[in-house]
Image (cartoon, grey):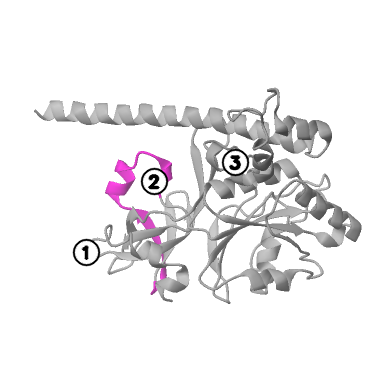
Amino acid sequence: MELTALGFDGWFEQRAPALLQAGQGLARVTAVDRNAFLIRSEGAERYAELAGKLRFETQSAMDLPCVGDWVCAQWPASEGPALIHSVVPRKTLLRRKRPGTDVEFQLIAANIDVAFIVQACDHDFNMPRLDRYLLMAAEGHIAARIILSKTDLIPPEKLQQQVAQLAGAGISVPILPLSNDNGSGLDAFRALLVPGQTYCLLGSSGVGKTTLLNRLIGREAFVTKAVSETGEGVHTTTRRYLLVLEGGAMLIDTPGMRELGVMGTSEVMKDTFADLGELALGCRFTNCTHGGEPGCAITQAVAGGTLSAERYRNYLKLKKESEFRGASYFQKRKKDKEFGRFIKAAKKSMKA
């Protein structure tokens, strides 16, 4: 398989040569399991480990390889793992705030062209969560599409109401209703997959991501479980992996995510909430925070019923969350860099 078939295009061609050293070749990361990696090149797929320099000199987990990354690797002449020496700069990146109290990013996947955000019509349809997924994709410069799955479990009129609700909320992302059970929408989904392009499936557990992947490859290659009696999803996918489909497109399945913390996304909120951005043009003050100032066009739209109060509250919540955590993250990074410089200076003084 040629590298171009794995998604290596002109963007990477301009950046990879500066990193490649003698004896190294380019490969794409197809799976990550703790400190072990599965990489694929033109010739084969092989397990790999981090080279010592990359492992010990990396200051942030953000600089380590993730699924979808292109890496410079050294392939051994005999049996044994390959060595990853460096990561090629990423074109796009999907990340979230690490679950828990840590103010740190967690990598999900890299170099994705389109993210399919899957929500099940019967129990998982949730506008605030959808906004978080859309914001996550926009922050990583990734195009997004919405998949409404399990359409066979609801009446047609309810599906129409959900589609209308998305449109009424100002969400202009393309929407595709789909049923893994009766096959409705599957052909339309396949038609969206372009050879050489990389896609990913995002969504909660139990929305049908793994079942959809099985339908695409034509066999039950990956384990699925029924949704629990409460309507909550059951975790089946436990790690991220990149799969090359028969038609030449690549698809990354991801585990269901219960926590979708955001930070540092203030700059792209205007894209995710474009409808509020248009309304904001009518605010009396150019620096309006839309938190209750006089002459705020957004709060007036909420009062007048032309803007959903739920969408407005979710906007304020995400904006506050992103700004607060983003500031905390950059303060932490600044302290880490200062500490790193202190350690280097101390080592130099000890050698003198």
Q: Which residue is drawn at 83% across and 36% down?
A: 305
Q: In this view, does 2 lie to the left or right of 85?
A: right
Comes first in the chain, label 3 or label 1: 1
Say which element carries label 1: loop
Q: Residue at x 68, y 23 (%)?
A: 293
Say which element carries label 2: helix
Residue 245 drawn above or below residue 74: below
Q: Which amino acid does label 2 sit on?
A: Asp
Disc 3 versus disc 2: distance between alpha carbons?
25 Å
Q: Determine crowd level at label 2: few under 14, some 14-19, many 20+ residues with C-alpha closer than 10 A.
A: some
Q: Determine crowd level at label 1: few under 14, some 14-19, many 20+ residues with C-alpha closer than 10 A.
A: few
Numbered circle sitting on residue 338? none
Q: Mark 2 points at which residue?
A: 63
Nearest the camera: 27 or 4? 4
Nearest the camera: 181 or 200? 200
Q: Which residue is drawn at 51% across and 42% down?
A: 106
The x, y position of residue 162, in whole percent, is 82, 52
Comes first in the chain, label 3 or label 2: 2
Q: Mark 1 points at which residue?
A: 22
Which mark's residue is nearer the viewer, 3 or 2?
A: 3
Task: Give the residues drawn in magenta, as a range.
Answer: 42-64
Q: Name the residue under label 3.
A: 269
Q: What residue type is labelled 1?
A: Ala
Disc 1 versus disc 2: distance between alpha carbons?
22 Å
The x, y position of residue 164, in whole percent, is 82, 53
